[in-house]
Amino acid sequence: MTENKDLEAEIHPLKNDEVRNQDSNEVSNRHKEIKCKKLTKFGQLSRWRTATFFLFLFLCLIVVFAFSFIIPCPVRPVSQRTWNRTFENAVTYPFLTLWDVNKDKVTDVIFAFKDSSNTNINGSCAAEGLSFLCAYVAVLSGTNGSLLWQRALAEDVQHVQCGIENLGGTKSSGCLVIGIPHLLTAISSSSGETLWTLNASFAVDFSVIGPALILPDLDGDDVEDLLIFFRPADQVGSITKLIFLLLSGKSGDPIGKEVCHNITEGFVHFSPLIHITNTGAYYILFIQGSVQGVALKDLYAQATGIPLTASNLYAAFLKSDPEWEKKTDPVSRKIEIYSSRTAKYLQQVHVLGKNAGKLLISTNDTVQLLDGQSLQTYWHHNISQIQGVPVPGYFNKDGVFDFLIEDFIEKNKKKVTIVDGENGRILWEEDLIYRENCPKPSTVKTVSRSTFFFWGELPTQTNVSVPEDLTETRHYLYMIHPSHPNVILELSNSSENVVAFTTALFEQSRHACNVLLVGQPIGSEPGPLTITKQKLKEAISLSTVRRLNKGHDDFSDDEIKEYLYRMRYSS
């Protein structure tokens, strides 16, 4: 047995304990050396990474502190909840225009007036060398009502259009001022300085009619051009001719010659618009008793004498529409849009994804919606006597414009109706006491629907019978939102003369306001003229809840006011 063990030991010499211990020590030493080398290299790399991290952190902190404390942040203007500005001994024109003229992201208020105080301050009649009691265009800051600029004009003001980009070739926006009878001047929105004025020698035999239409660039100077309308100066009542003039938006020079358009019937309400068909063809639509249209390509060819071909540089703006060409008279080159001889108002209704959209045409006793491409009728709504331009808004949640219509139904009484833009059915209506010179209604969009504003007086037990001779004309401003159709808010009431009114977003998605122009209209004796801006939230908090006899509302007055106060608005 002993011999076998010895033999086994010889056959496997490495299995003895001594040899195994020796080998283990050698391997362990080699591993330690390798590990020490690796740890040394890793430690050096780790220190470099740590140093780099802290260096970048230090640089980031320097940048943050620089922007926070060293470089001043732009100061956002703080808009006052309510402001008003008064001009003594003035009369005013019946319109307001809103535009951010000083680029502070808050809408400003543009209006026109005459002031009897003969001062020689900058921008006054005396400073401009004009006759006493000339007209002014002025701009008030939307934030606090301060006067940004004013300028005197040689003629009475008929129309002011602002927000025309690059007008006069500038890189900012401009305003077009249309006067009576000849004035046509482009001015800078930011300063009121003159950019160009239409040559008076051309317009001496014509009287300009506003508003102008903004066209695509027709003369290749990268500035949008204008279409201006004139009538013969000696025709004040029934107009038999309408004169078109293409005008360069950069220089104010005519593009070609004037184009005469014969009118078979005179018109009272002039509301031209640019209509683009689904093929991209431009048409000029206007009212001449009926609603007529003229292709921009035909107008351009008549004015310039340049035949249009596919190779023309600006042919993209002067396309044809085969469907509308078939409806165009080959001699007069006119297309009849709506054949009624009593059209009063013409409006475009935009439809997402369609150039042509829809056309809303109002006559004295009907409102009708047409397809903007085929001119087929969607619906019509009969009324007694329309009182003004229908106002679009969203009463229901179908994403289609609905319309607020004011209808004079009998002496001292009118009906306010909101009709569904999809099918013309009545969504809401209410009878009100009618007042002379009542301001126009307005709307402002909330997140999914709209808030509607209108003027009048709700009948009560004390005023059911309205006397023919009203000793006091009191104007009431009402607000309704479709979430509470049985309740309206009385926002204000005043016996003063409200010449113009509108509601708009003064700051995008956050600051809806009412603007009132109160004073004496042109032709009256001068008196105080006051422009007031009031934040809608402020008006709601001070309002009175009026409940209608249309159904029951389970909410208290305070709950309704709180709900409407917290409402958010969108552009």
Image: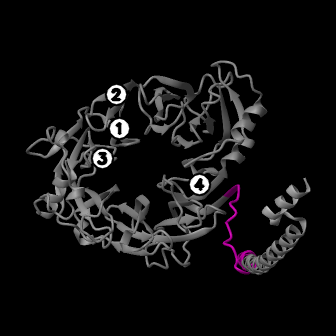
* Circle 1: element type: strand
Which quadrant would residue 567 be assigned to in this image?
top right
* Circle 4: element type: loop
- State which tag comes first along the sequence, 4 or 1: 1
Q: How many residues crowd around disc 1 within 10 Å: few (fewer than 14), some, or many (20 or more)?
A: many
* Circle 3: element type: strand
Which quadrant would residue 444 be assigned to in this image?
top right
Residue 533, percent from left and from top: 64, 54
Alpha carbons under labels 1 and 3: distance apart: 10 Å
- State which tag comes first along the sequence, 2 or 1: 1
Residue 101, percent from left and from top: 52, 66
- Give residue 508's mark: 4
- Residue furthest left as drawn: 331
Residue 274, percent from left and from top: 31, 50
Residue hosting label 2 = 378
Observer-nearest of 317 and 254: 317
Which residue range is magenta in the image?
58-83
Kind of residue sitting beneath label 2: Tyr
